[in-house]
Image (cartoon, helix red, strand yellow):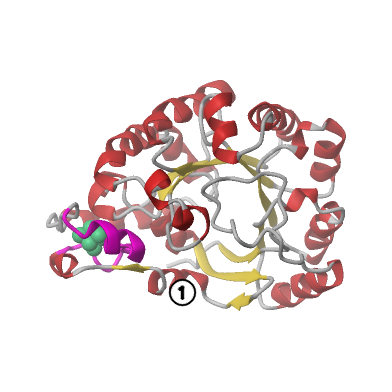
Amino acid sequence: MKTKAYRKLMLVPGYSCNNRCLFCINYDMRGMKPRSTVEILRQLKAERANGCNYLEFAGGEDAIRPDFCLLVKTARRLGYERVMVATNGRVFSYRNFAEKAVDSGLTDIVFSVHAPSEKLHDRLVQAEGCFRQAMTGIENILRLFSGTKNTIGTNTAITKLNYRELPETGRMIAGRFGICNSEFIFADPSRGGVAHNFDMLMPRISEAAPYIRECLAIGREHFHRGIVENLISNWAARYVPLCYFTDFFPFQISDARENIVFSNVTHSTPEGNVADYLKARREVNRRKTAKCESCVLKEDCEGIWNRYLDVFGDDEFQPVQDIDIRERKIKYIKDFLSCR
Ligand code: SF4
């Protein structure tokens, strides 16, 4: 079998941000001192020497750093094949900045789009005008990436305040912008904004799942094409228990897909490094229950948030008994690798 495509460095230069998203996992860390340029450049070099060839900037809003374009340019010079940033999109609404960032070598940009309307999006991110700026940012980058192999994507937090709007959000992303690379992320109550505002933000999976499923179905056609065209493209849900999404497993479940696409992910934050993030993610913050013992997907499933189970229990979860699902996964993986 061929090797996996990318070894990824997920780099958090700091947590400073120009938004105040209610659900932000780094809600309590925005005041932390960001890492210096020298420190980040040293790490980029060291992780490249370790074999990392895919760099993801996570934050915080990294694009507001004065050295952002320098960091991107240097990463590409060092040999990172792809450099991606996740952004709230606001600074990309300024055409000069968007051009400079693309010229510096960004290959993939993921915009946060949390609702199909200005009113709800701006409420979720606690920043008036953010929706309009993000839409302009997407339009700028679509124009600048046109005719290249670069990718543009979106991510959407799934909370109690917006899960009913997911299908409309998906239709806007795919229909208005033609974007087929989108992730829908189930709220994480382990820390940050959702931990602080659990009752307001944490949805029940049994109530949110029909909307998430409808949204995933919108991207199905794009997703099938995406396997062949681009390893990075996907239209998937993250952090969801598999029993509600067996027909979207593995490629439309980000956690499962990541285990196929990336050989390893190093997570680097101002607090320190996690050398094998995929492994750590399975072992910290989520667990399975006694019910999961008889589930055929228990090895693939990363379980349910500890806090979620502590509050709601496991009544909603039904062990999967269909053994064909695993066979289907093996076939998908073979097809996937043969397309490379
Ligand atoms: S292991 Fe548990 S949570 Fe995961 S799919 Fe099976 S029953 Fe659901």
The amino acid sitting under disc 1 is: Ala
Q: Residue at x 28, y 64 (%)?
A: 310
Residue at mark 1: 280
Q: Residue at x 76, y 49 (%)?
A: 63
| Residue 32 is covered by the magenta coloring | no
136 or 340, which is in the foreground?
Answer: 136
Residue 210 placement (x, y as % from top left): 27, 36
Q: Residue at x 69, y 71 (%)?
A: 270
| Residue 314 is covered by the magenta coloring | yes
Q: Is 46 left or right of 317, judged from the image as shown?
A: right
Q: Quadrant of residue 81?
A: bottom right
Q: Which residues are magenta?
A: 295-315
Q: Quadrant of the N terminus?
A: bottom left
Q: Quadrant of residue 76?
A: bottom right
Q: Is 126 left or right of 222, judged from the image as shown?
A: right
Neighbour class for label 1 at 10 Å: few (<14), some, many (≥20)? few
Q: Could you tell me if residue 337 is visible in this image?
A: no
Residue 239 placement (x, y as % from top left): 39, 55
Residue 268 placement (x, y as % from top left): 64, 71
Residue 101 placement (x, y as % from top left): 81, 44
Residue sitting farthest toward the top: 176
Examine the rendered structure and indicate whether residue 64 appears above or below residue 261: above
Q: Could you tell me if residue 101 is visible in this image?
A: yes
